Image (spheres, rainbow, N blue to C red):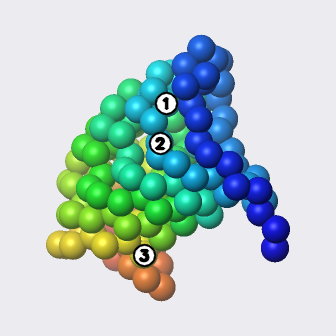
Protein backbone atom coordinates (compact mmCIF):
# COMPACT_ATOMS: atom_id res chain seq x y z
CA UNK A 1 0.00 0.00 0.00
CA UNK A 2 1.09 3.54 -0.69
CA UNK A 3 0.94 6.13 2.01
CA UNK A 4 1.34 9.85 2.12
CA UNK A 5 3.49 10.90 5.04
CA UNK A 6 2.56 14.19 6.64
CA UNK A 7 3.89 16.07 9.63
CA UNK A 8 1.53 17.29 12.35
CA UNK A 9 1.39 21.06 12.34
CA UNK A 10 -1.28 22.50 14.57
CA UNK A 11 0.01 26.03 15.06
CA UNK A 12 -2.52 27.35 12.52
CA UNK A 13 -5.40 25.51 14.25
CA UNK A 14 -5.41 27.79 17.27
CA UNK A 15 -7.13 30.44 15.16
CA UNK A 16 -9.83 28.01 13.98
CA UNK A 17 -12.27 28.29 16.84
CA UNK A 18 -15.04 26.13 15.35
CA UNK A 19 -13.02 23.07 14.33
CA UNK A 20 -14.82 19.96 15.61
CA UNK A 21 -13.00 17.08 13.87
CA UNK A 22 -9.41 16.06 13.28
CA UNK A 23 -9.24 12.89 11.25
CA UNK A 24 -6.56 11.04 9.37
CA UNK A 25 -7.21 9.23 6.12
CA UNK A 26 -6.13 5.62 5.76
CA UNK A 27 -3.54 6.71 3.24
CA UNK A 28 -1.97 9.51 5.27
CA UNK A 29 0.46 8.60 8.03
CA UNK A 30 1.02 11.49 10.38
CA UNK A 31 4.40 12.03 12.01
CA UNK A 32 5.61 14.40 14.68
CA UNK A 33 4.25 15.09 18.15
CA UNK A 34 0.94 16.32 19.52
CA UNK A 35 1.50 20.01 20.19
CA UNK A 36 0.19 21.49 23.43
CA UNK A 37 -1.48 24.24 21.36
CA UNK A 38 -4.03 21.66 20.26
CA UNK A 39 -5.77 22.11 23.62
CA UNK A 40 -6.88 25.57 22.45
CA UNK A 41 -9.37 23.93 20.08
CA UNK A 42 -12.18 24.24 22.63
CA UNK A 43 -14.92 23.05 20.26
CA UNK A 44 -13.01 19.97 19.15
CA UNK A 45 -15.25 16.92 19.54
CA UNK A 46 -13.50 14.18 17.56
CA UNK A 47 -9.86 13.17 17.18
CA UNK A 48 -9.60 10.08 15.00
CA UNK A 49 -6.00 9.42 14.03
CA UNK A 50 -5.13 5.77 13.66
CA UNK A 51 -2.09 4.00 12.29
CA UNK A 52 0.45 6.77 12.07
CA UNK A 53 3.79 7.63 13.55
CA UNK A 54 2.98 10.31 16.10
CA UNK A 55 5.59 10.25 18.86
CA UNK A 56 6.01 11.66 22.33
CA UNK A 57 3.19 11.77 24.81
CA UNK A 58 -0.24 13.26 25.23
CA UNK A 59 0.21 16.85 26.46
CA UNK A 60 -0.76 17.47 30.08
CA UNK A 61 -3.15 20.24 29.07
CA UNK A 62 -5.27 17.86 26.96
CA UNK A 63 -7.90 18.01 29.70
CA UNK A 64 -8.79 21.46 28.38
CA UNK A 65 -10.53 19.78 25.43
CA UNK A 66 -13.76 19.73 27.41
CA UNK A 67 -16.00 19.06 24.37
CA UNK A 68 -14.07 16.00 23.19
CA UNK A 69 -16.29 12.95 22.63
CA UNK A 70 -13.94 10.60 20.76
CA UNK A 71 -10.19 10.32 21.30
CA UNK A 72 -8.78 7.66 18.99
CA UNK A 73 -4.99 7.56 18.80
CA UNK A 74 -4.75 3.86 17.98
CA UNK A 75 -1.49 2.47 16.56
CA UNK A 76 0.74 5.48 16.91
CA UNK A 77 4.14 5.70 18.61
CA UNK A 78 2.93 7.54 21.71
CA UNK A 79 4.74 6.81 24.97
CA UNK A 80 5.05 7.77 28.61
CA UNK A 81 2.46 8.00 31.33
CA UNK A 82 -1.06 9.14 30.55
CA UNK A 83 -1.61 12.66 31.84
CA UNK A 84 -4.09 12.81 34.71
CA UNK A 85 -5.91 15.64 32.93
CA UNK A 86 -7.19 13.26 30.25
CA UNK A 87 -9.47 11.77 32.88
CA UNK A 88 -11.17 15.13 33.41
CA UNK A 89 -12.70 15.11 29.90
CA UNK A 90 -16.06 13.91 31.14
CA UNK A 91 -17.66 14.16 27.67
CA UNK A 92 -15.53 11.27 26.32
CA UNK A 93 -17.55 8.29 25.08
CA UNK A 94 -14.67 6.59 23.24
CA UNK A 95 -11.05 6.38 24.35
CA UNK A 96 -8.86 4.26 22.09
CA UNK A 97 -5.14 4.29 22.89
CA UNK A 98 -4.43 0.77 21.64
CA UNK A 99 -1.02 -0.18 20.22
CA UNK A 100 1.17 2.55 21.67
CA UNK A 101 3.96 2.53 24.24
CA UNK A 102 2.17 4.07 27.23
CA UNK A 103 3.66 3.15 30.61
CA UNK A 104 2.82 3.40 34.27
CA UNK A 105 -0.34 2.41 36.07
CA UNK A 106 -3.86 3.18 35.01
CA UNK A 107 -5.16 5.86 37.38
CA UNK A 108 -8.40 5.34 39.25
CA UNK A 109 -9.28 8.85 38.00
CA UNK A 110 -10.44 7.05 34.85
CA UNK A 111 -13.64 6.58 36.85
CA UNK A 112 -14.38 10.27 36.17
CA UNK A 113 -15.19 9.35 32.56
CA UNK A 114 -18.82 8.57 33.34
CA UNK A 115 -19.98 8.79 29.70
CA UNK A 116 -17.38 6.31 28.41
CA UNK A 117 -18.91 3.46 26.41
CA UNK A 118 -15.74 2.11 24.74
CA UNK A 119 -12.24 1.87 26.22
CA UNK A 120 -9.36 0.23 24.37
CA UNK A 121 -5.95 0.42 26.04
CA UNK A 122 -4.38 -2.93 25.19
CA UNK A 123 -1.00 -3.43 23.56
CA UNK A 124 0.75 -0.83 25.70
CA UNK A 125 3.22 -1.19 28.58
CA UNK A 126 0.93 -0.49 31.52
CA UNK A 127 1.74 -2.15 34.83
CA UNK A 128 -0.28 -2.80 37.95
CA UNK A 129 -3.84 -3.89 38.35
CA UNK A 130 -7.04 -2.75 36.71
CA UNK A 131 -8.68 -0.07 38.90
CA UNK A 132 -11.90 -1.25 40.49
CA UNK A 133 -13.68 1.97 39.45
CA UNK A 134 -14.81 0.26 36.25
CA UNK A 135 -17.60 -1.48 38.12
CA UNK A 136 -19.17 1.94 38.76
CA UNK A 137 -18.99 3.06 35.14
CA UNK A 138 -22.51 2.14 34.06
CA UNK A 139 -22.10 3.43 30.48
CA UNK A 140 -18.99 1.35 29.75
CA UNK A 141 -19.88 -1.63 27.61
CA UNK A 142 -16.56 -2.97 26.32
CA UNK A 143 -13.13 -2.80 27.87
CA UNK A 144 -10.02 -3.90 26.00
CA UNK A 145 -7.24 -4.19 28.56
CA UNK A 146 -4.62 -6.65 27.32
CA UNK A 147 -3.38 -8.22 24.14
CA UNK A 148 -6.25 -10.27 22.75
CA UNK A 149 -8.39 -9.76 25.86
CA UNK A 150 -11.86 -8.38 25.35
CA UNK A 151 -13.76 -8.00 28.55
CA UNK A 152 -17.45 -7.36 28.91
CA UNK A 153 -17.42 -5.07 31.93
CA UNK A 154 -20.75 -6.36 33.16
CA UNK A 155 -19.48 -9.94 33.27
CA UNK A 156 -16.14 -8.95 34.76
CA UNK A 157 -17.58 -7.07 37.70
CA UNK A 158 -21.02 -8.70 37.88
CA UNK A 159 -22.73 -5.44 37.02
CA UNK A 160 -26.19 -5.34 35.53
CA UNK A 161 -27.08 -2.56 33.15
CA UNK A 162 -30.37 -0.95 34.00
CA UNK A 163 -32.82 -0.48 31.15
Q: Quadrant of residue 27?
A: bottom right
Q: Provide the secondary structure element on which disc 3 rests.
A: loop
How dense is the environment of label 1, judged by Cα within 10 Å: few (below 14), some, or many (20 and up)? many
Instruction: Decide if residue 27 is on the left or right side of residue 95.
Output: right
Mark linked to residue 34: 2
Q: x and y percent of residue 137 in the render? A: 35, 53
Mark 3–mark 2 distance (CA, rounded to whole Å): 20 Å
Q: Nearer the viewer, residue 139 or 42?
A: 42
User: Are the residues at dot 1 and dot 2 in contact (C-beta closer than 8 Å)?
Assistant: yes
User: Are the residues at dot 3 and dot 1 in contact (C-beta closer than 8 Å)?
Assistant: no
Mark 1–mark 2 distance (CA, rounded to whole Å): 7 Å
Q: Nearer the viewer, residue 49 or 153?
A: 49
Q: Residue at x 21, y 73 (%)?
A: 127
Q: Residue at x 21, y 54 (%)?
A: 108
Q: Quadrant of residue 13?
A: top right
Q: Provide the secondary structure element on which disc 1 rests.
A: helix
Q: Nearer the viewer, residue 148 or 162?
A: 148
Q: Nearer the viewer, mark 3 or mark 1?
A: 1
Q: x and y percent of residue 103 in the render? A: 27, 65
Q: Residue at x 57, y 31 (%)?
A: 10
Q: x and y percent of residue 45 in the render? A: 58, 33
- Tag 1 residue: 38
Task: Please identify the residue farthest to the right as the structure is shown.
Answer: 2
Mark linked to residue 116: none
Mark 3–mark 1 distance (CA, rounded to whole Å): 25 Å
Q: Provide the secondary structure element on which disc 2 rests.
A: loop
- Tag 3 residue: 123
Which mark sits nearer the N-terminus, 3 or 1? 1
Amino acid sequence: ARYIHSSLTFICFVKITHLILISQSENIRQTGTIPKEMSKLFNLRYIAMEDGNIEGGIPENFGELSSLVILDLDAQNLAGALPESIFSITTLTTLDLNENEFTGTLSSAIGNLSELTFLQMDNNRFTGSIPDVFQNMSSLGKLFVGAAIIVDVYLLFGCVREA
